[in-house]
Image: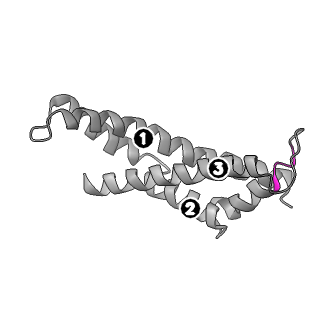
Amino acid sequence: MISSINFNSCVTEKSGYDDHIRANWATFVLYAKEFAKNPATLSSDAIFWRDRFLKDSQVAPGISKSVYGLFDGALGTGGLGGCDLIDMYYRGDPNSTKTWFIGYRDVFMNHTGYLYHSIGMGVILDSAVETL
């Protein structure tokens, strides 16, 4: 079972990657919304949001590092400081006053679904950075 110190550091590092992806997602959506209005000619608003997205996506830790960090953590291959996020979600938080049975379906599916959704968003953003 994961120690409480390791659990907290895993959650903290995962949150940083996840926050970076979600913040850039919001900027990317604003760019896509402006771009969709007239794809043939970029408006000044579209150019503003594109440039901001590209600038923000390079801020540490960077989109690629965030995606790979979450992905490695999901695979249990040493991402996020050696965290195996799937096992962590399966076993639960040792600090929590609320306990659930190991592998409790609702909690496990909620956490892993959110994790995979974040990875999917990050992959889209990473490809957008490469394309733009």
Query: Where residue 102 sits in the image (x, y, percent)?
Result: 85, 56
| Label 1 – label 2 distance at C-alpha | 18 Å
Q: Which residue is mark 2?
A: 71
Quarter where residue 38 is shown: top left
Q: Main secondary structure of the magenta part?
A: loop
Residue 95 - label: none
Residue at the (34%, 57%) spot, across then down: 127
Quarter where residue 1 is shown: bottom right
Residue at the (21%, 37%) spot, across then down: 36
Query: Where residue 96 sits in the image (x, y, percent)?
Result: 86, 41
Residue at the (26%, 56%) spot, across then down: 131
Check residue 7 for magenta coloring. no
Viewer-closest of 18 and 35: 35
The correct choice, above or below, for 78 with respect to 10 in the image is below
| Front disc: 1 or 3 | 1
| Label 3 – label 2 distance at C-alpha | 13 Å
**Which residue sits furthest left?**
40
Which range of residues does the magenta coloring cover?
91-95
Query: Where residue 41 sits in the image (x, y, percent)?
Result: 9, 38
Amino acid at the residue labelled 3: Glu
Viewer-closest of 40 and 130: 40
Element on which disc 1 rests: helix
Left or right: residue 121 compared with residue 13: left
Q: Which residue is mark 1?
A: 24
The correct choice, above or below, for 80 with respect to 57 in the image is below
Q: Is residue 14 visible?
A: yes
**Which residue sits furthest bottom?**
77
Residue 13 - label: 3
| Front disc: 3 or 2 | 2
